Image: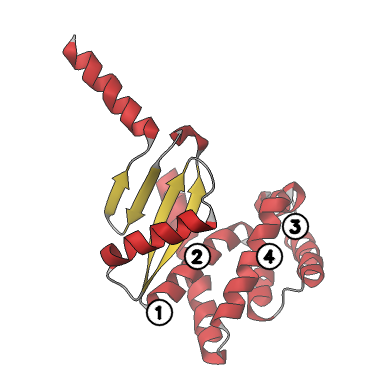
Amino acid sequence: MRVAETTSIVSGVAERYAGALFEAAAEAGVIDAVGSDLDAFQALIDESADLHRLVRSPIFSAEEQKRAVAAVLARAGISGYAANVILVAAANRRLFVVPDIRRAYKALVAAHRGEVTADIVSAEPLTETQADALKAALLGVAGGKGITLATKVDPSLIGGLVVKIGSRMVDTSLKTKLSSLKVALKEVR
């Protein structure tokens, strides 16, 4: 099985879990609470190498993962629909898909609200002021009711941003500009 096929399978599984989670959350009127719980669990994964290993490693049994995650969820105060989906994923040996479930859930929430998601990659984390200014600048381009920023940090960009909204992308990173300059200088020779 090739990497693209594996990625497609994982995203399909994540989308099915996220779809079921979104439907249940919408019916119960707890869309934002579920999103917050998923964000909180992702933050725990990002902060803890041990939890990251538990989520990603195939050496742990489903029962071990479920017990450990149940304890983490209880300690973090994560309950309800989000906790149930995380525990079901653990029981089905799909705990590694939880970050993708979170992303798919956020996309469903954004679509439900008519929001557009802009994927932003920057060399350093954006400050709140920078994020607000970027949202304001992109709002006219987005054409939706609102815009959500999905930010990532990639120090190799050196500076600038890579902004992607739908199929449109603008790359103002210093890394790309330096690469273009390098190519232009080679053509001059």
Which sits earlier in the primary sequence, circle 2 or circle 4? 2
Query: Would you call the spot at circle 4 few (<14 residues within 10 Å), some (14-19), or many (20 or more)?
Result: many
Q: Position of residue 27 (x, y in %)?
A: 52, 91
- Disc 4 marks which amino acid? Ala
Which sits earlier in the primary sequence, circle 2 or circle 3? 2
Q: What residue sits right under mark 1 in the picture?
A: 113
> Hey, which residue is sitting farthest top in the picture?
189
Q: What residue sits right under mark 2 in the picture?
A: 13
Indicate which disc residue 61 carries. 3
- Residue at disc 3, secondary structure: loop
Cα distance between the residues tagged 2 and 4: 13 Å
Q: Nearer the viewer, residue 112 or 178?
A: 178
Query: Would you call the spot at circle 2 few (<14 residues within 10 Å), some (14-19), or many (20 or more)?
Result: some
Residue depicted at 69% across the width and 68% down the height: 91
Residue depicted at 41% across the width and 47% down the height: 4
Cα distance between the residues tagged 1 and 4: 30 Å
Cα distance between the residues tagged 3 and 1: 38 Å
Q: Nearer the viewer, mark 3 or mark 1?
A: 1
